[in-house]
Amino acid sequence: MAAELNAWQRDWPAPAKINLFLHVVGRRADGYHLLQTVFRFLDFGDVLRFSPRDDGHVVAAHALPGVDPDTDLTVRAARLLRATAGDRQGATIALAKRIPMGGGLGGGSSDAATTLMALNRLWGCGLTSRELQALGLQLGADVPIFIHGRSAFAEGVGERFTDVAMPPAWYLVTMPSVAVPTADIFRASDLRRDTPALHAADWHPGVGGNDLEAVACRLHPEVARHLAWLRRAGEARMSGSGACCFAAFENEAAARAELAALPAGMRGFVARGVDIHPLCDGAH
């Protein structure tokens, strides 16, 4: 194997992300939407472990509910990396899932990115961060930011980054009991697609909204209920295409006080904003 056994035995984190704003500024001829957003990681997420295999197969240790094992993003990421690197090694991928599926927190994308970064090291593939980001984009628009590894203003379909400095913050993230299919949001006729573009240098926390919120709230009133509750005392956003929503606080105590005050039937968690991915090695 290309790595020592103890490297295979470690845990590999896959953090959640939030979108501090998300604008749809246009649409390409091929139908892809042009976006602007700021990504920030959270100290909350999934954990992956990888085991070497002698038979050359790439498999998931456990199937995710409702997900065909062959379409699991971690399996697809590993197979894509192996095909690109011309490798014949195998792996079993064990995923401890905490990030809600369909929540707009980037769980599947983060898992795929961690798979690419981890197996690139464990298999000794030697791909650069930019090469891994290009592979990640084939799997989903949010995968490259996790490989880029820093809080960033993102443009295009979400793959062009300008790093941003962020003030410390704690977030209360609420989890409506619905899964929002991203495709449903982007094909909605009432989605705004012409928000004026921002310059990265002009953005600061509090600027912008989420253009996908109105459609998500129309399709899923539970999202609107969570946003209304969070906004009773200040600013709140939906993350990504939903359904999770969040509000920022200056300290952990304030965020946890709001968590304790959640109405019956609402679920959430408190997490600190993180500006560098725990697997980021600075190589860009």
Image (tube, rainbow, N blue to C red):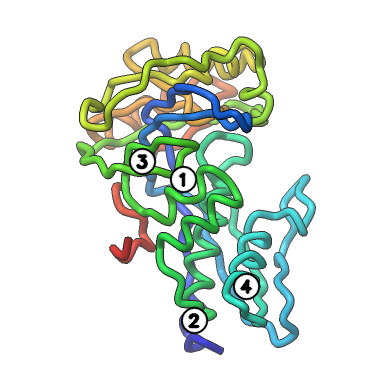
| Element under disc 1 | strand
Observer-side mark, 3 or 4, equals: 4
Query: In the figure, is residue 217 to the left or right of 273?
Result: right
For the residues labelled 3 and 2, the Cα–Cα distance comes to 29 Å
Observer-side mark, 1 or 3, equals: 3
Residue, disc 3: 40
Q: Amino acid at mark 2?
A: Gly
Q: Amino acid at mark 4?
A: Arg
Q: What is the quadrant of residue 231 in the picture?
A: top left
- Tag 2 or tag 4, which sits nearer the N-term? 4
Query: In the figure, is residue 95 to the left or right of 60?
Result: left
Residue 127 in the image: state x and y as whole percent.
46, 71
Residue, disc 1: 16
Residue 227 in the image: state x and y as whole percent.
48, 16
Vertical side of 33 occupied by 94: above or below: below
Q: What is the quadrant of residue 73 in the picture?
A: bottom right
Q: Which quarter shows the C terminus?
A: bottom left
For the residues labelled 4 and 1, the Cα–Cα distance comes to 25 Å
Q: Amino acid at mark 1?
A: Ala
| Element under disc 3 | strand
Residue, disc 2: 124
